[in-house]
Image (cartoon, rainbow, N blue to C red):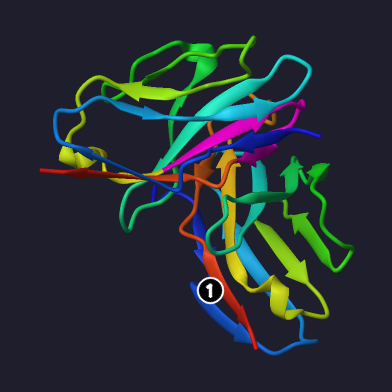
Amino acid sequence: DAGVTQSPTHLIKTRGQHVTLRCSPISGHKSVSWYQQVLGQGPQFIFQYYEKEERGRGNFPDRFSARQFPNYSSELNVNALLLGDSALYLCASSSTSDLYNEQFFGPGTRLTVL
Amino acid sequence: AQRVTQPEKLLSVFKGAPVELKCNYSYSGSPELFWYVQYSRQRLQLLLRHISRESIKGFTADLNKGETSFHLKKPFAQEEDSAMYYCALNTGTASKLTFGTGTRLQVTL
């Protein structure tokens, strides 16, 4: 297993555009979480999905949305991009939804908004 | 709201010296605490969690509820310990981690 995979690796967009980021979890993992990591900061929780349902949402505006597909892969969508959305977006998967479970992180997608 | 504080951005120690990476948290209930590590050009990965009470790669961390701390310690630093270390807190029922800003550990000869 290649672990958690994310695409694309890098992305450059302009203000006001829309972006879709993709994540494939480790085989057998049903939970996917998304984090935003701004330079110099720790990752900040955006969403968790488990069995295609939203289980948690961080303090992000409605411009951020996500979904999980029947194969447990996930997409993060961001509308009306702002300069401040420039960050590394991390996806993490785990086998269950509970808080004790180890999360396995992907390599991230580096988004630059110009 | 929960918060994690890592006061040091950079900690530089000599090989063989003891290491202590500080982590304080803010949460009134029963927290679940983790240390995650990111080695150069690698992914963020779990180092240890307080519930396991284990030693990983010589590192240990004890939850001190009185001081609301979860400091990471190792008696003798090795070069391969150089990395970015993040303390993280989970307070809900979901996998929703609150991370600190991280401490870069630099072990020099």
Q: Is residue A27 visible?
A: no
Vertically, is B76 above or below A75? above
Residue B72, given in percent of the width and then of the height, sits at 41, 25
Q: Is residue A83 magenta?
A: no
| Mark 1 secondary-structure assignment | loop
Residue at the extreme left of the image, as rendered: B109
Q: Is residue B16 left or right of residue B18?
A: left
Magenta part of the chain: B85-99
Quadrant location, the C terminus of chain A: bottom right
Q: Tell me the residue that label 1 is attached to.
A: A8
Q: Is residue B86 magenta?
A: yes
Main SS of residues in magenta: strand
Vertically, is B17 above or below A45? above
Residue B68 is drawn in which quadrant? top right
Q: Along the line of sight, which residue is nearer the eye, A57 or B78?
A: B78
Q: Amino acid at mark 1?
A: Pro
Q: Along the line of sight, which residue is nearer the eye, B20 or A91?
A: B20
Point 58% across, 36% down: residue: A94
